[in-house]
């Protein structure tokens, strides 16, 4: 299989390199094996890409290390790194429609979401960290008698980045931009279901002028390529976004290899509607809470707690909105809900729907797999609402990751805080109320890394993002991410102190 192939994405035909991207070159995987990528709207294979395994990871890590050690790279002016990140953002803007089309083909997302959110937010992320590149500074201290001390922030080294399939392009930029801004080198592995936008980005990376070896991409499976990054003795840091189960295995691999630094972004979510909320607006945000990426978002608002005084009205209006979803091929702009990302995710979601049914929850709406409106095959699921749910049901405790909400009633503020915090997850939570004192009180009491008041599912690259409890370790985005990608070095100078 040649590296460069043509791929049809909607009405566009795009040239795409499909080998491993190492040292700014396309290299065939050592084992020469390949794997297929599906269009989730049709279930049909659209392209084969090269399968990177442990030996390819090793080559990529050696390349990234060589670049990291290169004095020319070490001494690169941070303003030049900033300009390269800006240049990459410019190139993304120039190739905006290709990126939208590839992301749609790979993930099943709507045109509206990719063009309003995924691609612009990815560009925004690059520009934001371009701004940081020459502002990563240390502190100085004359506070200690007869001593002068300063700190400097040095890059961590080779960063192994493992990304998921739900936001392939956005996660690619979240993982490369702060790492490169701080002077690290990167070996990134795309998810097996969604490597296309990352592959496309690598050609732009060359054009933008990234030094060879600074960003390297492996396309392959988690069990060998991903695991090889997590356990590699010469990777200094791993950043992972994905499931809690895999997150645990990455922590274990880091612990039993070289104790590399680990940041994890996992899942978890809830949305609370107080009786004084502007119900119409709360419903629109709650619909977005589940319709964004059709529930395949780590902070999707799948557990909705509604105050008993407005429960009936909320349920009626919310159901009416959910019924308006038009499910079908995501390249048809009339469709508002596309397919789930893969057969595996589709089956997993249907399994959760079955468990909700057998645990005794009421299926208020939907609850089935369906063909798209236009009869297309593919991984479509009806927008689904469960009511009469209890805290111990699997659909309330675990991550469904599909277009499925469970709506529960509450009586008091204290009770709903307990209910919302009764989870091992702590990524995000929404509160809908006009009472701002209550909003401050409740957001303070919620155990979550991100909380929203009168909105839901809004994340900006300039604000830290990450989870409490089992939803993760560390923060991405904002200035906080720079901490993941730098080591602080303290330097003491003796200014007349005698040895004790
Ligand atoms: O996740 P995995 P999967 C949740 C969501 C979803 C579930 C399973 O609930 O239904 O996870 O999805 C790589 N060592 N989220 O199976 O396995 C893998 O190749 C190293 C939440 O896709 O966590 C991919 O690149 N890496 C979430 C990445 O890990 C390994 C986003 C994610 O895959 C590996 C995605 C291993 N042993 C899923 N095994 C979020 N937080 O947004 C797999 N990988």
Image: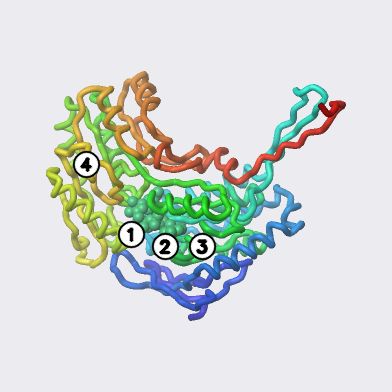
Q: Mark 2 or 4 closer to N-term?
A: 2
Viewer-side label of 3, 2? 3
Q: Mark 4 or 3 closer to N-term?
A: 3
Q: Quadrant of residue 223?
A: bottom left
Residue 341 numbered mark, or none: 1
Residue 406 numbered mark, or none: 4
Q: Residue at x 49, y 58 (%)?
A: 96
Q: Position of residue 148 (x, y in %)?
A: 80, 29
Q: Position of residue 339 (x, y in %)?
A: 28, 59
Give the residue pinned by disc 3.
228
Along the viewing direction, whichever of 208 and 27 lies nearer the viewer? 27
**Left/right of residue 1 with respect to residue 434 in the rendered view:** right
Q: Quadrant of residue 438?
A: top left
- The CA distance from mark 1 to mark 2 is 9 Å
Along the viewing direction, whichever of 200 and 466 lies nearer the viewer? 466
- The CA distance from mark 4 to mark 3 is 38 Å
Looking at the rendering, in which quadrant would you find the C terminus? Answer: top right
Badge 4 element: strand
- The CA distance from mark 2 to mark 4 is 29 Å
Along the viewing direction, whichever of 415 and 280 lies nearer the viewer? 415
- Look at the numbered disc 4 and say if its residue's Cβ is closer than 8 Å to ligand 1: no
Badge 2 element: loop
């Amino acid at each position: 299989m040649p590296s460069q192939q043509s791929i049809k994405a909607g009405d566009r035909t795009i040239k795409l390199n499909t080998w491993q991207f190492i040292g700014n070159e396309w290299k065939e995987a050592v084992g020469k094996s390949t794997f297929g990528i599906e269009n989730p709207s049709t279930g049909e294979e659209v392209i084969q890409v090269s399968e990177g395994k442990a030996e390819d990871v090793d080559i990529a890590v050696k390349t990234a290390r060589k670049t990291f050690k290169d004095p020319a790279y070490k001494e690169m002016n941070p303003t030049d790194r900033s300009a390269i990140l800006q240049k990459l953002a410019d190139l993304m803007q120039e190739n905006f429609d290709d990126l939208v089309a590839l992301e749609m083909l790979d993930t099943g997302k709507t045109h509206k979401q990719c063009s309003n959110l995924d691609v612009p937010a990815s560009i925004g992320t690059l520009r934001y960290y371009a701004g940081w590149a020459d502002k990563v500074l240390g502190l100085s201290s004359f506070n200690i008698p007869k001593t002068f001390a300063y700190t400097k922030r040095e890059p961590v080294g080779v960063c192994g980045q493992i990304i998921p399939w739900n936001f392939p392009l956005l996660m690619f930029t979240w993982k490369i931009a702060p790492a490169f801004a701080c002077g690290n080198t990167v070996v990134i592995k795309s998810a097996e279901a969604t490597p296309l936008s990352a592959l496309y980005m690598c050609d732009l990376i060359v054009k933008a002028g990234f030094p060879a070896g600074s960003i390297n991409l492996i396309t392959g499976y988690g069990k060998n390529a991903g695991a090889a990054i997590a356990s590699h003795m010469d990777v200094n840091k791993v950043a992972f976004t994905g499931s809690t189960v895999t997150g645990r295995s990455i922590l274990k691999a880091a612990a039993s290899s070289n104790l590399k630094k680990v940041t994890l972004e996992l899942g978890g979510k809830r949305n609370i509607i107080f009786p004084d909320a502007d119900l119409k607006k709360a419903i629109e945000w709650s619909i977005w809470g589940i319709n964004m990426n059709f529930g395949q978002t780590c902070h999707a608002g799948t557990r909705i707690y509604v105050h008993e005084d407005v429960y009936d009205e909320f349920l009626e209006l919310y159901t009416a909105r959910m019924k308006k979803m038009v499910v079908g091929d995501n390249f048809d702009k009339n469709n508002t809900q596309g397919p789930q990302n893969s057969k595996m995710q589709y089956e997993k979601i249907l399994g959760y729907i079955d468990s909700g049914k057998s645990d005794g929850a009421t299926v208020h709406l939907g609850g089935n797999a369906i063909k798209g409106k236009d009869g297309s095959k593919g991984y479509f699921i009806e927008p689904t609402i469960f009511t009469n749910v209890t805290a111990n049901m699997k659909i309330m405790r675990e991550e469904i990751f599909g277009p499925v909400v469970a709506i529960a009633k509450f009586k008091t503020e204290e009770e709903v805080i307990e209910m919302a915090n009764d989870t091992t997850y702590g990524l995000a939570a929404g509160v809908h109320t006009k009472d701002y004192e209550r909003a401050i009180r409740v957001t303070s009491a919620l155990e979550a890394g991100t909380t929203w008041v009168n909105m839901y599912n809004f994340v900006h690259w300039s604000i830290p993002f990450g989870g409490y409890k089992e939803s993760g370790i560390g923060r991405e985005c904002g200035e906080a991410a720079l901490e993941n990608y730098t080591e602080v070095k303290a330097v003491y100078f003796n200014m007349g102190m005698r040895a004790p």
